[in-house]
Image: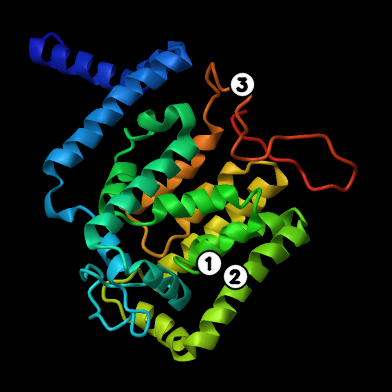
């Protein structure tokens, strides 16, 4: 039976397929980081070109909700998760975005895309184009959603804890990353993060208290929302990941945990993993460029563990 040519061919193909992951890793390991970056950049440009050519009417689909939100009644949409123009974030964000209503829709959309591009460039530095090979990043940016901004806020939160207010006032559950400060006993940073959130929420509540009761009701009324048990399980897993990362000095776990904890976790929302970009290998020319995440430095006994980017 083994002498049948067809079976011999199938066996060789099977062995080749099983060896493919190992061979791929071997190839990548042999590549110079600059060469790898350049090859991935070409692929990233191709992904960007495909969305520009075939993305169709989905362009700025989510951005429109941010431009058109009515701060006096932001939650008046039906319960479809894909309702065009539906707004799902806190009243504070609705009130903030209403300041841009003076802009024409095309100007707001272009400005929003430009902001997302700048954030990708800030996070990725010389890896920025290479990052676009991860399709969810381009997809999320094409729709104009906020996962890229959430990732930036979480990364910035290592240096400026007040940035966590944006996370807590939008998609909320990625705020599980604040356990980083708890596990490391960085109480001042935790107080700044929660204090900034409380101040913004307090001002917003004083302007429109009823909306703060309407916001959670509108979220819980969305059809097809993730099962509560599955969401709770993911949030608990994310909490354990952050605590482990905090105690072992692995700041990248905050980004992974925040993504895992998203209430609506799908392929598109994994774009938040762009927050891992600051931990990519440094490239020639990066010398003297400040790290996005604070570099490690020696401290006194009892001081919080330092974090590192681009190890």
Q: Nearer the viewer, residue 238 or 96?
A: 96
| Secondary element at tag 2 | helix
Assign a secondary structure to mark 1: helix
x%, y% of residue 162?
62, 60
| Image quadrant containing the N terminus | top left
Disc 2/disc 3 C-alpha distance (Å) = 35 Å
Write down the residue under mark 3: 287
When the figure is inspected, residue 78 is found, relative to residue 53, above or below; the finding is: below
**Mark 3 neighbour class, 10 Å CA radius: few under 14, some 14 to 19, many 20 or more:** few
Which residue corresponds to the image point at 58% horizontal and 58% vertical from the top-left?
Answer: 163
Q: Residues within 10 Å of mark 2 (few under 14, many from 20)?
A: many
Dot placed on the residue nearer the N-terminal end, 2 or 1? 1
Position of the C terminus, as image quadrant, is: top right
Tag 1 residue: 168
Helix, strand or loop at mark 3: loop
Cβ–Cβ under 8 Å for marks 2 and 1: yes
Q: Quadrant of residue 15?
A: top left
Vertical arrangement, residue 140 with respect to residue 300, above or below: below
Residue 199 x/y as whole percent: 62, 75
Tell me if I can see residue 267 in this picture: no
């Amino acid at each position: 039976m083994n002498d049948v040519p067809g079976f011999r061919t199938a066996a060789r193909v099977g062995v080749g397929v099983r060896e493919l992951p190992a061979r791929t890793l071997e190839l990548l390991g042999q590549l110079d980081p600059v060469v790898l970056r350049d090859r991935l950049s070409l692929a990233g440009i191709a992904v960007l070109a495909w969305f520009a050519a075939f993305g169709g009417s989905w362009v700025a689909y989510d951005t429109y909700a941010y431009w058109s939100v009515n701060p006096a009644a932001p939650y008046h949409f039906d319960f479809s998760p894909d309702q065009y123009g539906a707004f799902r974030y806190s009243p504070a964000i609705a009130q903030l975005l209403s300041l841009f209503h003076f802009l024409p829709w095309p100007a707001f959309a272009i400005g929003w895309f430009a902001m997302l591009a700048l954030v990708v460039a800030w996070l990725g530095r010389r890896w920025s184009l290479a990052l676009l090979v991860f399709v969810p990043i381009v997809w999320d940016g094409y729709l104009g959603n906020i996962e890229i901004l959430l990732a930036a806020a979480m990364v910035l939160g290592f240096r400026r804890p007040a940035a966590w207010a944006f996370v807590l006032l939008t998609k909320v559950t990625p705020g599980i990353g604040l356990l980083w400060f708890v596990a490391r006993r960085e109480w001042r940073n935790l107080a700044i993060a929660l204090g900034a959130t409380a101040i913004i929420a307090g001002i917003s509540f004083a302007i429109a208290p009823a909306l703060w009761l309407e916001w959670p009701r509108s979220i819980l009324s969305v059809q097809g929302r993730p099962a509560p048990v599955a969401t709770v399980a993911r949030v608990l897993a994310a909490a354990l990941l952050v605590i482990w990362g905090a105690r072992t000095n692995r700041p990248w776990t905050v980004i992974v945990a925040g993504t895992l904890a998203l209430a609506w976790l799908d392929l598109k929302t994994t774009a938040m993993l762009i927050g891992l970009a600051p931990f990519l290998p440094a490239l020639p020319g990066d010398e003297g460029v400040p790290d996005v995440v604070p570099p490690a430095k020696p401290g006194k006994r009892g001081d919080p563990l330092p974090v590192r980017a681009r190890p």
